[in-house]
């Protein structure tokens, strides 16, 4: 029992660290060039979630300092919000349309979460959640266009969830097909 209590105390700060790291600003948990996420198909709904290092989207991930950097952030976020069917290509015969678009970045707007030490490296992610409603999901042949739009992204690890199966795939530039 005493041993169990000691373990519980030791693990508590560890858990808190993990929870703190789960937000958008994430000091060490990501690798530039590598995004991750999931695609879930349920009845006529397709939900795509992506977590991409800010560096892969904007070319930097520190708070914006110049107008040029602010414009780069706006332009990239406009693409992610406006070109959903280019980010993820769903064939037109399936009749899919985005019914909910959520794209979040801590680099948008006024600088926030600035480190106290200006030499400290701050990592952050762009978080995306798209919900598509389709006329039919049978024969859905999805392709990830994200890698073409943002060439700094080299690979995307995806968890694929359908009524039939759960699988993990890595999408790369040479193979952007997502088996559904
Ligand atoms: Zn980073």
Image (tube, helix red, strand yellow):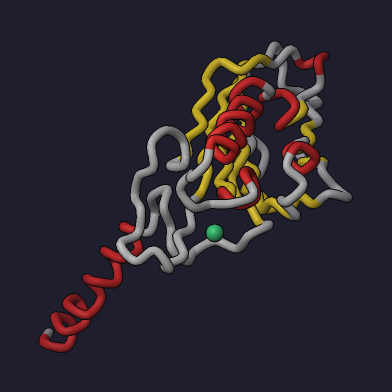
23 vs 14, nearest the viewer: 23
**At 37% from the left edge and 59% from the top edge, which residue is drawn?**
21
* Along the viewing direction, whichever of 76 and 128 lies nearer the viewer: 76
Relative to residue 97, is residue 58 depicted above or below? below
Up-down relation of residue 28 to residue 11 (above or below): above
Residue 152 appears at what percent x and percent y?
73, 51
**Foreground of the two, 18 or 149:** 149
User: Residue at the location (17% across, 88% down)?
Assistant: 3
As drawn, 79 above or below 10: above
Q: How many marks?
A: 0
On the image, which quarter does residue 14 sit in?
Answer: bottom left
Asked which quadrant contains residue 160, the reply is top right
**Left or right of residue 26, residue 164 in this image:** right
Name the residue at the left extreme.
2
Q: Is residue 81 placed above or below 180 in the rendered structure?
A: above
x and y percentages locating residue 149 in the rendered image: 76, 37
Name which residue lies at 35% across and 59% down.
Answer: 115
Looking at the picture, how far across and down is residue 157, in whole percent?
66, 53
Q: Which quadrant of the rendered structure holds the N terminus?
A: bottom left
Name the side, left or right, on which 60 lies relative to 95: left
Where is residue 92, by image quadrant? top right
Left or right, 4 with reference to 166 = left
Residue 166 seen by the camera: no
Which corner quadrant holds the C terminus? Answer: top right
Q: Residue at x 49, y 52 (%)?
A: 62
Ligand 1 is located in which of the four quadrants?
bottom right
Residue 72 visible, this orientation:
yes
Q: Position of residue 84 (x, y in %)?
A: 66, 24
Residue ranking furthest to the bottom: 3
Of residue 67 and residue 101, the one placed in the foreground of this image is 67
């Amino acid at each position: 029992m005493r041993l169990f209590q000691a373990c519980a105390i030791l693990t508590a700060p560890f858990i808190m660290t993990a929870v703190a790291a789960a937000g958008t600003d994430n000091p060490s948990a990501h690798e530039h060039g590598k995004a991750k996420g999931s695609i879930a198909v349920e009845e006529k709904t397709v939900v795509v979630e992506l977590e991409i290092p800010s560096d892969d989207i904007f070319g930097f991930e520190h708070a914006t300092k110049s107008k040029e950097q602010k414009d780069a952030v706006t332009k990239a976020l406009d693409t992610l919000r406006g070109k959903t069917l280019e980010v993820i290509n769903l064939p037109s015969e399936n009749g899919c349309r985005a019914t909910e678009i959520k794209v979040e970045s801590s680099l948008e707007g006024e600088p926030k979460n600035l480190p106290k030490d200006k030499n400290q490296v701050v990592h952050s992610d762009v978080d995306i959640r798209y919900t598509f409603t389709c006329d039919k999901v049978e024969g859905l042949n999805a392709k990830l266009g994200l890698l073409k739009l943002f060439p700094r992204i080299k690979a995307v690890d995806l968890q694929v969830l359908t009524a039939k199966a759960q699988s993990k795939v890595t999408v790369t530039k040479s193979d952007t097909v997502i088996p559904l």
